[in-house]
Structure formats: C-alpha cells, structure tokens
Image (cartoon, rainbow, N blue to C red):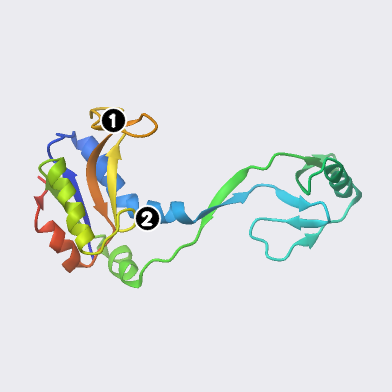
Amino acid sequence: MRQLIIARKDLNMSPGKLAAQVSHASMAFISWAINCNAKPVMKYSIVNVYGKELKTGEKIPKIFFGAELAELARQTRAAGRDSFTYRTVKDGEHTKYEFCENEVESYECKFSIEKEVYEQWFAGIFTKTICEAKNRNQLMKAITMAEELGLTEGEDFFLIKDNCLTELEPEEVDENGVGRTLTCIGFRPLPDEVAHKISRKYQLYR
C-alpha cells in the first residue's frame, strides 16, 4: 500500500507552503472519515420532563429523583417544553441544580479501516509517493485516470485548494466569495499496482 500525492510545480510554492499543502493532501482521507463520523459529547445532562434523564450515549435512561429536579421539570412543562438541561452547583455542603445551556465537551468518533490499509500502511511505514504536475491541466488528468480506475472524489482522492491568504493568487471564487487555488491531489492509501497506474504518468517531485 502507498499514498500518492501529486502537487503542482507551476505555482512555485515556497518550501513551507508546499509542505503545508502536501500535509493537507496526506491527511484528507482520514480527516474525511473523522468528519463523517464525529458525534458531539455534551457536557451536561438532558432531562425529559416526564422523569427520564438522558445522557449522550446512554442506552437505558435512568429516573431522576429529588424535589429540585422535579421543580425544574415542572417549570419546563409550564413553559411548554419537554426537556431541559441542568448543572450542579455546590453551595457549601449542599448541591443545587439550575438550568443551563448545554455545550459540547468533546467529540467521539467510530469508523472502520480496511484490513489491508491498517496492516500495510498505518501499522507499516506510511509509504508515500510525491509526484509533480507541470500545471493545473496536467494535475486534472490524474482525476480522469482515477475515475477510470473506479476511484471516487471525496472518498478515494481529494482536491486540495488553498485559501490564498498568503502567497498564492486565487484561480477561482467559490459560492461564498472565497478565492481558492488548486494545489494538489491526495489519494487514500492504495494498492501499489493501482497507485503506479497513475504515478507512472508523473515524475517524482523535485
């Protein structure tokens, strides 16, 4: 298994910019998997006014007890809502409960990695091949070759576009008015024979 990355030579990127863009390309496939599967873990408990306290990831709700929580539930019902979020506040030796806005404490993520990718790449030596494209048109030809091999953009390969905040000038403007320039293409780890069918059309970056 190897990861193929093709970067444009005509942009004359500085070593730092080139390193950043290639890093984006290398991380793109795993970043995509994380973004597609990340779920927020909330900081505070969400309580159903009918007496069930629901915590993120909890399969079986538990019944809450106590007059203070019951009072918060009553106020919630009176306001026409069916749940509320609360936090505990220490008042000397006494614990009080009060309404609060919930917030994300962290994110949890679960996804699968193909056996070959894990054993031959992640658990191996992270083999990468960095090639160069003379210009944008030559870089785009890699997309055609990838699609002919059955690879899909956004899953198997990723177009890396710089936001042009430093040294590059924008070649296109997106729907939000942000100028971008295509710098490179990053592939997920592929079997050597598949990666070579694309890389053989390009020379190593130098």
How many residues crowd around disc 2 within 10 Å: few (fewer than 14), some, or many (20 or more)?
few
- Can you identify the residue that label 1 sits on? 164
The kind of residue on which mark 2 rests is Ile
Residue 60 as seen in the image, left or right of residue 121: right
> Considering the image in quadrants, where does the C terminus appear?
top left
Give the mark nearest the N terminus, 2 or 1: 2
- Above or below, comparing residue 117 to residue 170 in the picture: below
Circle 1: element type: loop
Q: Please tell me which residue lies in front, 142 or 123.
A: 142
State the image quarter where residue 165 is shown.
top left
Q: Are marks 2 and 1 in contact (CB under 8 Å)?
A: no
* Front of the two marks 2 and 1: 1
The kind of residue on which mark 1 rests is Cys
State the image quarter where residue 170 is shown.
top left
Q: Residue 65 in the image: state x and y as whole percent.
A: 87, 56
How many residues crowd around disc 1 within 10 Å: few (fewer than 14), some, or many (20 or more)?
some
Residue at the (27%, 33%) spot, across then down:
172
Q: Residue 49 in the image: state x and y as whole percent.
A: 82, 51
- Above or below, comparing residue 193 to residue 97 in the picture: below
Residue at the (67%, 61%) spot, across then down:
58
Measure the alpha-carbon separation of dots 2 and 1.
24 Å
- Can you identify the residue that label 2 sits on? 30
